[in-house]
């Protein structure tokens, strides 16, 4: 499944917060491709990037360092 901006938006709105690896896996995409697409929403202020050292969301950062994307709008 190719990830579109609308699909990425719906995915994050539904989950509120997700690690990059989960997003890439869900859309059968590389992490880099997912990151590039998510930058659109980050640039618009709709998504916030939480780097693993700042994450307090219980996302298992200690066992799997990963950037986490959060829908904020």
Image (tube, rainbow, N blue to C red):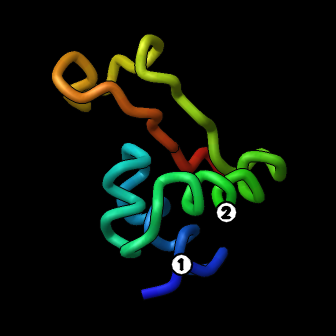
As drawn, is 9 to the left or to the right of 27? Answer: right
Q: Is residue 5 left or right of residue 11?
A: right
User: Which structural element holds mark 2?
Assistant: helix
Q: Position of residue 65 (x, y in %)?
A: 32, 25
30 on left or right of 60: right
The earlier-in-sequence mark between 2 and 1 is 1
Q: Residue furthest bottom?
A: 1
Write the residue at 45% across / 37% down. 68
Q: Which mark is residue 37?
A: 2
Please report the residue visible at 60 percent of the width from the left and 52 percent of the height from the top.
Answer: 35
Q: Residue at x 46, y 62 (%)?
A: 30
Question: Is residue 54 something that shows in the picture?
Answer: yes
Image quadrant in which the N terminus is located:
bottom left
Task: Judge by depth and name the residue closer to the eye, 52 or 9.
Answer: 52
Residue 5 image position (x, y, % from top left): 66, 75
Rendered location of residue 31, percent (x, y): 48, 54
Residue at label 1? 3
Tag 1 secondary structure: loop
Label 2 close to label 1 by CB (< 8 Å): yes
Q: Residue 66's spot in the image, x, y percent?
A: 38, 32
- How many angstroms separate mark 2 from mark 1 (CA)? 8 Å
Question: Pointer 1: residues within 10 angstroms few (<14), some, or many (20+)?
Answer: some
């Amino acid at each position: 499944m190719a990830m579109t901006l609308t699909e990425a938006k719906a995915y994050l709105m539904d989950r509120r917060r997700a690690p990059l690896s989960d997003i890439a896996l869900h859309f059968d995409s590389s992490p880099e491709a997912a990151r590039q697409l998510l930058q659109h929403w980050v640039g618009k202020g709709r998504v916030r990037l939480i780097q693993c050292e700042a994450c307090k969301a219980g996302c298992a950062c200690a066992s799997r360092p990963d950037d986490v994307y959060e829908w904020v709008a």
